[in-house]
Amino acid sequence: MTEKKIKLLIVEDNEQIRELFRRTFIREPQVEVLEAKNGVDAFKKFQELQPDVVLSDVEMPGEIDGISLCQKIKSSANPCHVILISGHGQQRNVDMGMEAGADAYKVKPVNPIELIRIVKSFGDKD
């Protein structure tokens, strides 16, 4: 019996940070990593690929930032878990992310072990 892979969509406009997140999950055989570099691309990939978890930066250039992306995902017909990542950890920022529907809000720098644990726990709930 093959275990279902957790599809994780990493959304980050900074290539080095996206690479860091990708490397965080490279040794996790049950996690399939998908990537997007902005909110528009991420929402298209969300609709096409139906990930189990979206890990998104909050601040991204363009018409869809992380908060808007989270709201669009959560109001879609097939929502998934959303983890928002931000350099801003003030309570008002966390509240805004959670009000948008985020399942978790983490402040950079993020502990990679904790991030793996969260993604795996969300994948186990499906």
Image: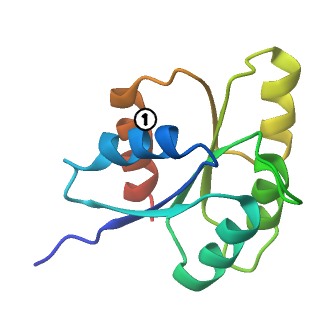
* The N terminus: image quadrant: bottom left
Taking the image as shown, residue 32 lies to the left or right of residue 88, namely left
Q: What is the quadrant of the C terminus in the image?
A: bottom left
- Left or right, 48 with reference to 4: right
Residue 79 picture quarter: bottom right
Where residue 26 sits in the image (x, y, percent)?
A: 25, 50
Write the residue at 83% across / 26% down: 93
Q: Residue at x 69, y 58 (%)?
A: 38
Q: How is the image coloured?
A: rainbow
**What residue is shown at x 30% (from left), y 68% (from top)?**
5
- Depicted 111 relative to depicted 20: above or below: above
Q: Does 91 sit above or below residue 66? A: above
How many marks overall? 1
Q: In the displayed orientation, state which residue is furthest to the left.
A: 1
Residue positioned most to the top? 90
Residue 7 vs residue 113: left or right?
right
Mark 1 element type: helix
Front-most of residues 49 and 117 = 49
Determine whether 68 is above or below 118 in the image.
below
Estimate the x, y position of residue 73 in percent, counting from the top left: 74, 65
**Left or right: 122 as drawn, with respect to 36:** left
Foreground of the two, 59 or 52: 59
Q: Looking at the picture, which amino acid does disc 1 mark?
A: Leu
Q: Residue at 52% x, 20% y: name it.
A: 109
Classify 10 Å Cα crowding around label 1: few (below 14), some (14-19), many (20 and above): some
Q: Which residue is mark 1?
A: 115
Residue lying at the far front in this picture: please name it: 15
Q: Which corner quadrant of the image does residue 76 belong to?
A: bottom right
Q: Which x, y percent locates residue 125?
A: 44, 57
